[in-house]
Image: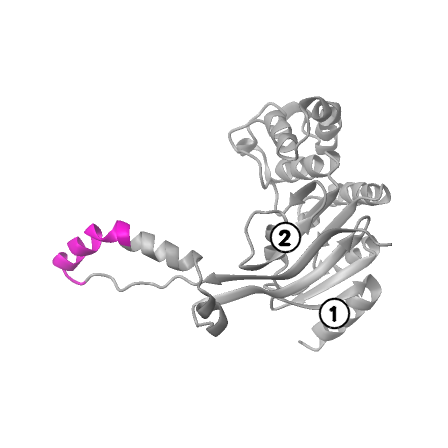
């Protein structure tokens, strides 16, 4: 029987667009505007981030839905490829799964240790060195220092940053940042790995190196959720796929079937 490691139940996420206020026209208006700014800004922040049931039901021009009632399950050992056009809600879904943001409604259940590559270096502290960030990332995953230490040399070697491991990561090139972020995420062996377009960055040699590592990770029975616009890569790496469009789940299932329908619709401009 299938063993779900991730359950997403009717997850929705909405944001409110900020409203530009009229600029003061006179000195008196400017002074009054400045005095009232703290209270006005607090009220505006609360309005941007809090919603009433009535607002969500009726909607409005200033409310944007990034996800609408998305439900699916991921079984242990699945390699799930997520496809959809820009603005489909893919990155928002990953941010909810990784607890970067909370859903407006619905809920997510995750049964395992999760590591996420939303973008290069997400979670790194720029003032800390590469060494310090490796240990920090492991601690965030709940790993004891001794366990992180056994993986340390392998992470540094894979990232090819031996000479710079004790340099603050704010000084790293974008390529070094990507290599270290990927190496940390996959070598600390989480139960679930989320990868969002990270293979679109970096040189070809490193991309191939990453693909081999992802394949090795998957063969160990680990679970991977992978976002990419490269459908050939999705088909190659994944056994299942999920298609989002305008924040809604269109289809989920066998990777060949989902990708075929997605590409057919995309060619029609749908």
The quadrant the C terminus occupies is bottom right
Q: Is residue 28 magenta?
A: yes
Identified at 74% across, 28% down, the residue is 157
Q: Is residue 232 magenta?
A: no
Identified at 81% across, 55% down, the residue is 238
Above or below, comparing residue 124 to residue 150 in the picture:
below
Asked if marks 1 and 2 touch (Cβ < 8 Å), the reply is no
Q: Nearer the viewer, residue 174 or 65?
A: 65
> Which residue is label 1 attached to?
262
Res. 38 visible in picture: yes
- Look at the numbered disc 1 and give the secondary structure of its residue: helix
Above or below, comparing residue 122 to residue 268 in the picture:
above
Sort mark 1 into few (<14), some (14-19) or many (20+) by Cα contacts within 10 Å: many
Q: Nearer the viewer, residue 108 or 37?
A: 108
Residue lying farthest bottom? 268
Q: CA distance from mark 1 to mark 2?
A: 20 Å
Where is residue 57? Give x, y as percent: 49, 71
Q: Quadrant of residue 244?
A: bottom right
The quadrant the N terminus occupies is bottom right
Where is residue 77? Give x, y as percent: 82, 48
The kind of secondary structure the magenta stretch mainly shows is helix
Identified at 62% across, 37% down, the residue is 177
78 lies left or right of 18: right
Res. 196 visible in picture: no
Q: Earlier in the sequence, mark 1 or mark 2?
A: 2
Q: Nearer the viewer, residue 1 or 6?
A: 1
User: Magenta part of the protein: which range?
Assistant: 25-39
> Which residue is label 2 attached to?
94
Where is residue 173? Give x, y as percent: 59, 36
């Amino acid at each position: 029987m299938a063993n779900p490691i991730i359950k997403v139940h009717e997850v929705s996420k909405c944001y409110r667009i900020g409203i530009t206020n009229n600029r003061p026209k006179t000195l008196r208006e400017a002074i009054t505007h400045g005095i009232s700014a703290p209270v006005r800004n607090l009220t505006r922040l609360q309005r941007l981030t809090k919603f009433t049931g009535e607002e969500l039901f009726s909607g409005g021009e200033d409310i944007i839905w990034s996800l609408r009632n998305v439900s699916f399950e991921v079984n242990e050992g699945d390699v799930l490829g997520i496809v959809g056009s820009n603005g489909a809600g893919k990155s928002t879904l990953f941010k909810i799964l990784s607890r970067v943001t909370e859903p407006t409604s619905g809920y997510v259940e995750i049964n395992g240790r999760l590591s996420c590559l939303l973008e290069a270096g997400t979670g790194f502290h720029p003032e800390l060195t590469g060494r310090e960030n490796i240990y920090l990332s492991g601690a965030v995953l709940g790993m004891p220092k001794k366990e992180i230490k056994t993986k340390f040399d392998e992470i540094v070697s894979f990232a090819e940053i031996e000479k710079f491991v004790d340099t603050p990561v704010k000084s790293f090139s974008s390529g070094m940042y990507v290599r270290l972020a990927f190496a940390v995420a996959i070598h600390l062996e989480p139960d679930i790995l989320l990868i969002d377009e990270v293979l679109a960055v970096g040189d070809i040699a490193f991309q191939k190196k990453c693909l081999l590592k992802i394949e090795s990770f998957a063969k160990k029975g680990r679970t991977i959720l992978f976002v990419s616009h490269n459908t050939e890569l999705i088909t190659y790496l994944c056994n299942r796929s999920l298609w989002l469009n305008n924040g809604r789940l269109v289809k989920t299932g066998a990777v060949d079937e989902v990708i075929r329908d997605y590409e057919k619709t995309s060619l029609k401009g749908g």
